[in-house]
Image (spheres, rainbow, N blue to C red):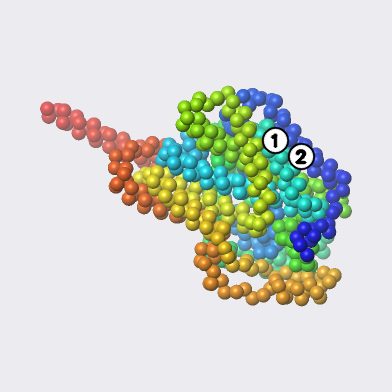
Amino acid sequence: MDEQSKDNDTSTLQWPDYLVIGLMLSISTGIGIYYRFTGGRQRTAEEYFSANRTMGVVPLSIALMVSFMSAITVLGISAETYIHGTQVTLLYLGGFFGTPIVLYLYLPVFTELNTMSVYEYLEKRFGVGARLLASTANFLQLLLYTGIVLFAPSLALEATTGLSGNMSIVLIGLICTFYSTVGGIKAVLITDVFQAVLIFTALLCVLSIAASDLDGGLSNVWSIAQEDGRIEFFDFRIDPTIRHTWWALLIGGTTMFLSLYAVNQIQVQRLLTAKSLKSSQRALILSGPLTLLLGSLTAFCGLILYAVYRNCDPVTSGKISSFDKIMPYFAAERMSRVPGVTGLFISGVFSASLSTISAMLNSLAAVALEDYVKPTCRKFSIEFPTEKATLIGKFLAVANGFTCLAVAFIAKSMGPLVEAAIGISGAIGGPILGIFTLGMVVEKANQAGAIVGTSTALITCIWAVFGTPKPPTPNLPLSVEGCDNSTLLLYHQNTTLFEDPADHSSYFYLYRISYMWYNPLGLAITLIVGYVTSLITNKIFYKNAREPEPNLFFPFLAARIRRRREDAQKTTNSQVFVLENRK
């Protein structure tokens, strides 16, 4: 049975469901139109890309949360806890440790620079070459990640309607491109608030329907999961080849959080829409509990789904083709008895993708404008038409939207949602975090070190992501004893799914490393290779290089550098004074 035929058995959307989905998409589109024709009407690029720095703390904190928690979270994390247990939730501890680092080290640097593209920092610190390398890598990362996010809602439509996912990819891509292009960053941020409500509503629908279906309601979910080995948090093994351990999730989660919130164009651009640095800091702090709440709720939904299908797993029984479709399958099978509820769930999944994709399209346009269009104009001595910057930005957002659509059609081959998204983000985000950290921490770092270190890390990490063959990922036990044709299914299960795992030592070591280590690996390689290369090249090529400005470093380092230079200047002045008096 092929994948499409597995999912064609279910077609449950009724006219109330389509009405709810249509209403959600109409509201999202309407917000874009409203902000196109109100306020300053986007006469400047400043308003289009940064909302004239007028966003309040609460809407900004919600926007920060939903841009991080896409449909990959709603569908992928629930599938992850369903098949692998609760260990993945330790990923959210990274935000707890990463937030103060972002607030007091990285964010003040970007706030003082007040730039539209974070990569302007790299040009000021190292040079144009470093800026273009990091910007190009980030552009590739966002295109690949957005393609996966765009693909995710198609899983929900396939499971609930049996239709091909291609139409949903096109639909959500066009809608999202439209309102993020027409309305600018302010429309994106305001729509995020509306979409956050829908995401929580979709998860609450799962909770309420499951509570009525399970014997004993939700009170037995934890005990069932514990009994079947799905509650695990404390695996302290220090082995990077183990998929999930405490150390992999804690260290990998922290560096992933930093790569997303400290130096990523999307989140930094959002943080800079606040009225002041204090407002940005408060918004990020407030987004933490919201992110943790949504992540925990999604993970718990995965345990609920396991309790529902404990005795008849839909994937093993051939009803659906992947575990990422387990929540949409539940919506199709159980929610359809209440008109409109399935549509509400689909709207929540769509909203989770819309919020993330719109942020990425707006940020991609900002990067393209600042890092490619304007420098190209300067190179060929063409005066950039400032009055047309907004129009050019909108054109770039449309172009990026269609490019992401193309990527979405190949996302099916990238594996499970969570692993594909985190793997790609880590492989490119880690080296990008590394080049910014190198610049903000190491005073002797230079452009040669930054480029060599980042390039080495990118090559290594991308090789780790896309290199094959990789060892298979073991799943926790599943049962089909409660299915109608359980005898045949049990035979199939015993002969195909639960064979003893082969010895993985025969696989190339780089391919065995857990995807959670890609981000820390990229960060470490960039810092080490970048530092060593800088030390070598400083002795050969950069003997008389000018000292970088103190405001390009972490605040505490900047203060120390200023004091040292002031002391050096005082010493020089006193020596000059003594020499003049001797004459």
Q: Looking at the picture, how far across and down is residue 271, in whole percent?
A: 57, 38
**Residue located at (44% from left, 38% from top):** 128
**Residue located at (63% from left, 32% from top):** 394
How packed mark 2 is, by other alpha carbons closer than 10 Å (few <14, some 14-19, many 20 or more), is: some
Q: Which of the 4 image quadrants contains residue 162?
A: bottom right
Residue to which mark 2 is pinned: 25
Q: Is residue 381 left or right of residue 273?
A: left
Instruction: For mark 2, give the secondary structure.
Output: helix
Q: Looking at the picture, how far across and down is residue 553, in whole percent?
A: 42, 41
Q: Is residue 509 left or right of residue 363?
A: left
Q: Is residue 491 visible?
A: yes
Give the number of the disc on residue 179. Answer: 1
- Total tally of numbered discs in the picture: 2
Q: Looking at the picture, how far across and down is residue 391, in whole percent?
A: 62, 28
Q: Amino acid at mark 1?
A: Tyr
Instruction: For mark 1, give the secondary structure.
Output: helix
Q: Which of the 4 image quadrants contains residue 87?
A: bottom right
